[in-house]
Amino acid sequence: MNTNSVHIEEDEIDIKEVFRTIYRYKIMIFSLVFFFGIASSYYAYFKPNVYEASTTVEVGSSQSSRVGADVLSMALDSGAINSYTEMGIIRSRFLAEKALKKINFSHKYYTTRKFKETELYKDSPFQVGMLKGFGISFDFYPVDEKMYRLVVTKLKDKNAEVWSYDETLPYGMEIDTKYFHLNIVKTKEADDLKYRFVISKHGRANGSVNVSQESKFSTILKISYTDNVPLRAQEYTNAIAEAYMAQNVEKKTKEATRKLTFIDTQLKRIISNLKSSAIKVEEFKKTAKTVDLSSKAEIIIQRIAEYETRLAEIAIDEEMLNTVYKQVKSGKNLETISIIGVGMAESPVASMVTELQKAIMKKRALRQDYTEMYPEVVKLRKNIAQLKKNIVATIKNLRNSVKAKKELMEISVLKQQKLLTKLPADERVFGQLQRKFVVNEKIYSYLLEKRLETAVVKASTVSKNRILDSAVTPNGAIKPKRTIIVIVGLILGLILGIALAFLREFLDDRIKSEEDILHATAVPMLGQIPNIKEDDDKIKVFLSPKSAVAEAFRNLRTNLQFMSNYSGVHTIAVTSTVGGEGKTTVCINLGAIMSMAGKKTVILNLDMRKPTLHEKFGLQNTKGMSTLLSGRTNLNDVIQHTEYEDLDIITSGPVPPNPSELIEGELMEKVLSKLKEVYDVVILDTPPIGLVTDARTLMHYTDTSIYVLRAGYSKKGFFRSINNLSKMKEISGLSILLNDVKAGQDGYGYGYGYGYGYYEEDSK
């Protein structure tokens, strides 16, 4: 017998109950898994394929030692190539626009195969030229070798007027309407019955260009691009790489051209000065008849010439420093700034400029996806401002250093000029003219040398970068991962199904198992009755004496014997909270199993408002408990014998107007006393206790009160009535019977001794 001695921890997770819950809602879970599986399969099938093509580029480094290099040598060098800067250039819109000139993204041709729309790219059987009508979706139907049908269905113009177009036209004919102007040329035989095309005015790449380093310190960059068309992915990736190589050469050529322009300007001035100096020297020689200088004068003149040559070089340094300073202050074209100047190689300017260029390119890449308020963009903006400030301050220091050198050279020149004034007048004048000529000649030779070097650089400019591996046409799509999508869909369906199952279980207030009863009340359990299928109103224990139902009632009969502490007549009241919980069915089968044990049994139908007991046995209900308790008939007249030995029935009789008063009358107790003299077991089929109080009155007259709860039907709130009854001392032998337990639940079919296989899973 089940009692409240079984202790269940409230915080314990009942694994069996978890599996029971899953099993209970298995159809819902399976339905959700099936639905999500179908939905994910549909999504995976119709999601367009994505192909990736990639190429690798080696970024060459032009960084070289600059120690001892003069200012123009450093001017010829644009600085060390930074991988992050190059990655930013590759991702830039500037480079994308160059690549788009080679790849056609504006013309999109589609066809439907296997229910999926596929882009044809260069495999279209026709080509479209358009002057007007960009962005309109046209349907194209091949008719024959010379004709086609062009359709536009219900579009709105800028005035919100709806228009359509449907005409059959010859290939090559120019079509000019109010809404579009185009021409369609056939390129090959059409394989499909219908096509669609859309022409954009400005083609844009479908995907984004990704650039990554092969390793942290590697100068090899991997350029990849994804597209729905494998051939276009390959062509655009190669176009990006080629545009990158071309702009690199273009940049270097522009730098060399700019430097040549600067040198040519200086050369024009020096040539003019050199000619003027040469003429003056020759004229002085003729006039003064002086052709040579003394050794002292020659030394002084040579020193002044050297100092003035250095002054000229310092002036060029100062001019170029001013150019860099103005460029940094203006903030324009900083990513292509040339790192030039005296002492720059040994100063932090080179590293700061590289860091500045890296920050500028990173910010430019972020601004394609984020606003100026994005935290990373704000951080980079502040970093760029600080770097510019530091570079400007450093260049100012370099300018001060150049200025100091210039002042020292000027002082040295003045000293030598004072010595020159002490020489004879002819030597002094001739020395000054000779000095200017020598200085201009040296500067001229210097500039010619550098111009030649720069011209060679310009003529032989090649990119120090190179393409290692060109992109090839992808063989298979990288996305979508259809198998993974379907698996994820099935898993999501399973998770959602289980979650909903437990949510429904949590919100479900119905009693389902013995554990629910043990948690809610201390009233003992008599047993559990499996689901009973109604078979032509036959009594189940008589119909199938060896079935699980019969065994369950035998177990109930045994438990009732253990509850009785006497050997006399046993009176049993059977009640429930509401109708439909199987109270009458329990009374019938309990009475049947008692009679099968040789106990003379009578069942009283005291549910006089909704009597059904007589229908189960096929008996008349013209008289019964209502006529007996009202004094209109005798006890012997209302007892009806059934076809089964030792089992008698007293039906409810006609429905009386006052059933409660009849049950609470003195005659009820006398009737029970008389029946106890004849029968071994008296079973009272009482009205539902949750609706009327009749059952509570009848329980006072019985030895045992059975409270029937139906699994999956009775509410947990019914335990309030049970607990209230258990507190009444005048009600003896109160116990609970769980009815209609399904197969596999609480042990049926799993080893409780009831699994004979004669019961069905039908609701009552």
Image (cartoon, rainbow, N blue to C red):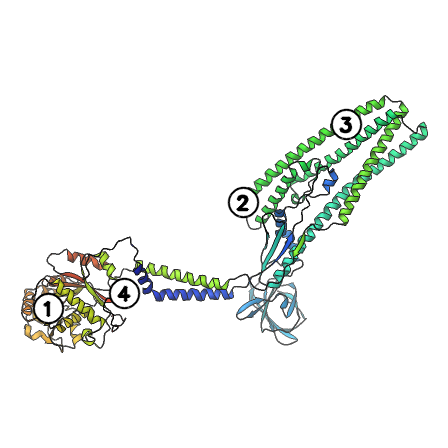
Q: Which residue is mark 4?
A: 745
The image quadrant of residue 354 is top right
What separation in Å lies between label 2 and label 1 (alpha carbons)?
87 Å
Residue 299 vs 691, above or below: the answer is: above
Which label is found at residue 376? 2
Closest to the camera, between mark 4 and mark 1, is: 4
Q: Quadrant of residue 387?
A: top right
Secondary structure at badge 4 equals helix
Please rate how many residues cluster around mark 3, counting C-alpha atoms within 10 Å: few if below 14, some from 14 to 19, many from 20.
some
Type of the residue with mark 3? Glu
N-term-proximal mark, 4 vs 1: 1
Disc 3 is placed on an element classified as helix
Quarter-of-image position of residue 314:
top right
Res. 202 visible in picture = no
Count of numbered marks:
4
The correct choice, above or below, for 323 with respect to 154 in the image is above
| Residue at figure coordinates x 65%, y 43% from the top left | 334
Badge 3 or badge 2: first in the primary sequence: 2
Label 1 CA crowd tier, 10 Å (few <14, some 14–19, many 20+) = many
Q: Is residue 678 above or below residue 372?
A: below
Classify mark 2: helix, strand or loop. helix
Q: Nearer the viewer, mark 2 or mark 1?
A: 1
- State the CA–CA distance, disc 4 to disc 2: 60 Å
Residue type, numbered disc 2 = Glu
Q: Is residue 490 left or right of residue 214?
A: left
Q: Are marks 4 and 3 in contact (CB under 8 Å)?
A: no
| Residue wearing tag 1 | 682
Which numbered circle lies on residue 410? 3
Residue situated in front as seen by the camera: 374 or 486: 486
- Marks 4 and 1 sit apart, C-alpha to C-alpha, by 31 Å
